[in-house]
Image: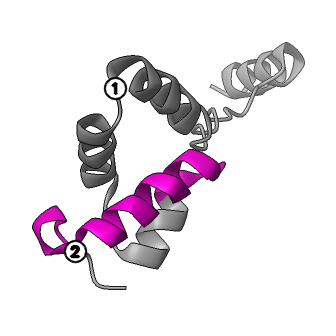
Amino acid sequence: MKIRKISELDSITIEKIIIKAQNEKKPYEVIKEEFGVVEKDINEIMKKRLNKEIFELWKKKAVASKPKPKPMKFNTIEDDDLNAKYYIKNKFE
């Protein structure tokens, strides 16, 4: 879907976005697919239309539903392997 700006949206579409954002578990992805509005614009719409406390609660819920980056996995080298490699390398020098 084409990415749209807030100024291109009419009031009915903005109301639909607000309802979707409050009801969905993953509001950013769903709204971007359906309406073509990016995360920054969704936050701006919600901040303008909701009062401060409700916006803060919604923001916590929306951010918590974002997938968190997976931690990087490092190959662990066991001490026995390291000692064996060191021994063989130094034996032939």
Residue 43, how many percent across, how many down? 31, 43
Q: Amino acid at mark 2?
A: Arg
Residue 44: x and y, percent? 24, 43
Residue tagged 1: 51
Q: Residue at x 26, y 66 (%)?
A: 11
Q: Is residue 67 left or right of residue 8?
A: right
Say which element carries label 2. Answer: loop
Residue furthest to the right in view is 80
Q: What span is in magenta?
A: 4-28
> Is residue 56 something one can see in this rendering?
yes
The quadrant holding residue 92 is top right
Query: How many numbered marks, from 0 up?
Result: 2
Question: Quadrant location of the N terminus?
Answer: bottom left
The colour scheme applied to this rendered structure is one colour
The residue shown at (10%, 67%) is 7
Direction from residue 59 to residue 12 in the image, left or right: left
Dot 1 falls on a residue whose secondary structure is: loop
Q: Nearer the viewer, residue 52 or 40?
A: 52
Disc sitting over residue 82 in the figure: none
In the image, which is nearer the foreground, mark 1 or mark 2? 1
The disc label shown at residue 4, or none: 2
The x and y percentages for residue 46 are 34, 42
